[in-house]
């Protein structure tokens, strides 16, 4: 059947893309800031309840996530501020009301806010996904003064209708499709929608929660990942996503490895050969290449 949302064009058959200043790699850092409903089953768990039952409220797993909002986010921000890197915050819109300080400081730092539904619940479970998308966009716009240009589904989940709805509601790019190193058009019924490369390979959930790697793993993967993209980027520009969650990468035993990623990139790549960009900056660059 093939992919119903994307034309298949092997990367070897594409016209080379050039980043501004002939940079080889665009690196974008995504911080997923999520609110889990204490009245429902948790989005994911690290500690099962005794006797294997499902409990509500699930205090240990709820507070595991909230640690990221109270502490971990601020560690991530300190590292990125140190390296003068602007993040893209993948935001559950409810955070605007529940944890407004995070949104205030993100906006003040010039970070981009990316729509990540209203709360951390798969869009497939929502009774009216258009309403959820619309409410998320509206609350982010009311809070920050700007409607989000991009969208990421919780768990990267979509229905068969999500891309069409996103385009109709004014979303310009989506991050759910982790199938390329370059942006590409998503097929939608009306308007346009661009896929910006996200990642499951440099993503702290698979690395730490599912695969149970030691703390250095994110840095070691990022180092090796960057080396390959940097070499390939001499021919055609590549996008490198680094996906984090404050309750995972923002903990004390992992934060120094997050810091080492940026130290390594800056020490390895000559000035201007790497661009740190937000999702919208990547979108605007890609669209300019298509003109």
Image (cartoon, helix red, strand yellow):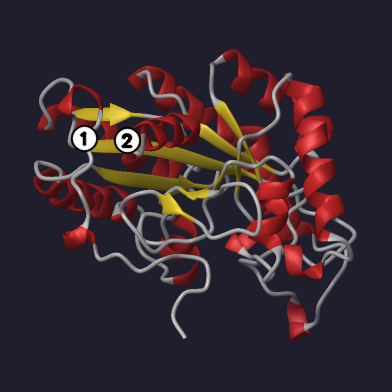
287 vs 118, nearest the viewer: 287
Residues at marks 2 and 1 touching, judged by CB atoms closer than 8 Å: yes
Is 174 located above or below residue 208 in the figure? above
Residue sitting at 80 percent across and 63 percent down? 58
Residue sitting at 30 percent across and 65 percent down? 9
154 vs 207, nearest the viewer: 154
**Label 1 sits on residue:** 18
**Label 2 sits on residue:** 289
Report x, y in % for residue 272. Answer: 18, 21
Quarter of the rendering occupied by the C terminus: top left
Per the model, the C-alpha gap separating discs 2 and 1 is 8 Å
> For mark 1, does the 10 Å Cα neighbourhood hold few (<14), some (14 to 19), or many (20 or more) residues?
some
Secondary element type, mark 2: helix
Residue sitting at 18 percent across and 53 percent down? 224
107 vs 211, nearest the viewer: 107
Report x, y in % for residue 150. Answer: 59, 41
Report x, y in % for residue 285. Answer: 37, 31
**What label sits on residue 173 in the rendered view?**
none
Can residue 37 be seen at all in this image of the molecule? no
Query: In the displayed structure, does residue 72 sit left or right of residue 43?
Result: left
* Mark toward the viewer: 2 or 1: 2
Can residue 162 be seen at all in this image of the molecule? yes
Residue sitting at 18 percent across and 45 percent down? 16
| Dot placed on the residue nearer the N-terminal end, 2 or 1 | 1
Report x, y in % for residue 238. Answer: 25, 45
Is 45 located above or below residue 173 in the figure? below
Quadrant for residue 128, please give it: bottom right
């Amino acid at each position: 059947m093939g992919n119903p949302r994307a034309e298949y064009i092997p990367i070897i058959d594409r016209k080379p893309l050039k980043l501004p200043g002939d940079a080889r790699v665009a690196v974008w850092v995504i911080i997923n800031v999520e609110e889990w409903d204490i009245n429902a089953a948790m989005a994911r768990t690290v500690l099962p309840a005794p006797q294997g039952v499902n409990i509500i409220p699930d205090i240990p797993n709820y507070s595991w996530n909230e640690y990221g909002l109270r502490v971990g986010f601020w560690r991530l921000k300190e590292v990125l501020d140190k390296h003068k890197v602007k993040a893209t915050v993948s935001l559950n819109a409810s955070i605007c009301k529940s944890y407004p300080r995070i949104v205030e400081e993100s906006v003040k730092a010039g970070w981009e806010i990316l729509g990540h539904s209203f709360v951390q619940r798969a869009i497939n479970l929502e009774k009216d996904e258009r309403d959820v998308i619309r409410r998320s966009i509206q609350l982010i716009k009311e809070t920050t003064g700007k409607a989000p240009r991009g969208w990421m589904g919780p768990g990267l989940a979509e229905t068969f209708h999500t891309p069409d709805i996103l385009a109709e509601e004014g979303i310009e790019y989506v991050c759910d499709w982790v199938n390329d190193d370059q942006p590409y058009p998503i097929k939608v019924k009306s308007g346009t929608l661009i896929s910006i490369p996200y990642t499951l390979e440099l993503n702290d959930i698979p690395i730490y929660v599912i695969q149970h790697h030691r703390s250095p793993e994110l840095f070691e993967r990022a180092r090796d990942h960057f080396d390959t993209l940097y070499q390939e980027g001499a021919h055609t520009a590549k996008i490198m996503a680094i996906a984090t969650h404050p309750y995972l990468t923002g903990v004390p035993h992992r934060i120094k490895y997050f810091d080492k990623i940026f130290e390594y990139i800056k020490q390895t790549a000559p000035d201007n050969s790497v661009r740190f960009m937000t999702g919208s900056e990547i979108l605007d660059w890609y669209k300019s290449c298509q003109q």
